[in-house]
Amino acid sequence: GIQVEQSPPDLILQEGANSTLRCNFSDSVNNLQWFHQNPWGQLINLFYIPSGTKQNGRLSATTVATERYSLLYISSSQTTDSGVYFCAVGVKLVFGKGTKLTVNP
Amino acid sequence: EAGVAQSPRYKIIEKRQSVAFWCNPISGHATLYWYQQILGQGPKLLIQFQNNGVVDDSQLPKDRFSAERLKGVDSTLKIQPAKLEDSAVYLCASSRSGTGGMRGDYTFGSGTRLTVV
């Protein structure tokens, strides 16, 4: 089955810093999504991005499907950005292990 | 629109006991999913329903887990008997169509945190 690897596993930032999270996947997929799981466990859709680039406020994502990776950019991070960021691929949503982000004030 | 509702929010049981979780998807969403999320890992799909039929249950441990979606709306997931390794968060999600994964049309509930002691 599809393998999904995310890096880094943990990331600690000061408020206002920028960051890049990476997702590598083992097979060609025509679906990729990024989710944020907040400290209370709620999973929120961030992007549906099988290819190309999208932006939503301080967050943006780029997927290069031919090279099997996706990047999530967070600019001017805030404490509310803390949580775990998951990449999921395929129609059945195979998830990676996530990147745990901690933003300190 | 109302979100995906799940209950209970937390459950603690002893091993070998049985437990059931309930999910009410977003109104009009034909597809319902149950995921298991073990601490430190991403969610793993257990079962997918399209209306009241099972589309995929390949990762459901059928010797102890069962799920149903009567009338194509609410769903229950049951574990009997529970093992220590079943301790996890059980997430329900719904999408408007069976290709929710293809369109990003996924909405997750808040989950049920199960602890088996």
Image (cartoon, rainbow, N blue to C red):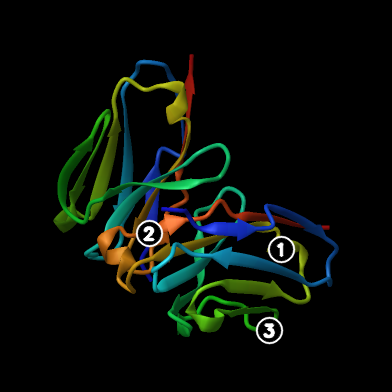
- CA gap between label 3 and label 2 equals 28 Å
State the residue in front, B109 or B13.
Answer: B109
Q: Give the left or right position of residue A55, taking residue B48 as reference.
A: left
Which of pointers 1 and 2 indicates the residue nearer the eye?
Answer: 2
Q: In which quarter of the image is the N terminus of chain A?
A: bottom left
Mark 3–mark 2 contact, CB under 8 Å?
no
Please give the name of the residue rendered at 56% of the width and 82% of the height, measured from the top-left corner: B70
State the image coordinates of residue A58 (x, y, percent, origin top left): 27, 28
- The secondary structure type at the circle numbered 3 is loop
Q: Earlier in the sequence, mark 3 or mark 2?
A: 3
Please give the name of the residue rendered at 41% of the width and 53% of the height, measured from the top-left corner: B1
Q: Name the residue under label 2.
A: B106
State the image coordinates of residue B75 (x, y, percent, origin top left): 57, 73
Q: Mark 2 lies on which chain?
A: B
Q: Report if residue B37 is visible in the image.
A: no
Please give the name of the residue rendered at 58% of the width and 40% of the height, measured from the top-left corner: A40
Q: Earlier in the sequence, mark 3 or mark 1?
A: 3
Mark 3–mark 1 contact, CB under 8 Å?
no
Q: Name the residue under label 3.
A: B63
State the image coordinates of residue A45 (x, y, percent, origin top left): 36, 48
- The secondary structure type at the circle numbered 2 is loop
State the image coordinates of residue A29 (x, y, percent, origin top left): 24, 64
Q: Mark 1 points at which residue?
A: B85
Q: Give the left or right position of residue B117, taking residue B91 as reference.
A: right
Q: Which amino acid does label 2 sit on?
A: Tyr
Q: Which of marks 1 and 2 is nearer the N terminus?
A: 1
- CA gap between label 1 and label 2 equals 27 Å
Q: Residues within 10 Å of mark 3 (few under 14, many from 20)?
A: few
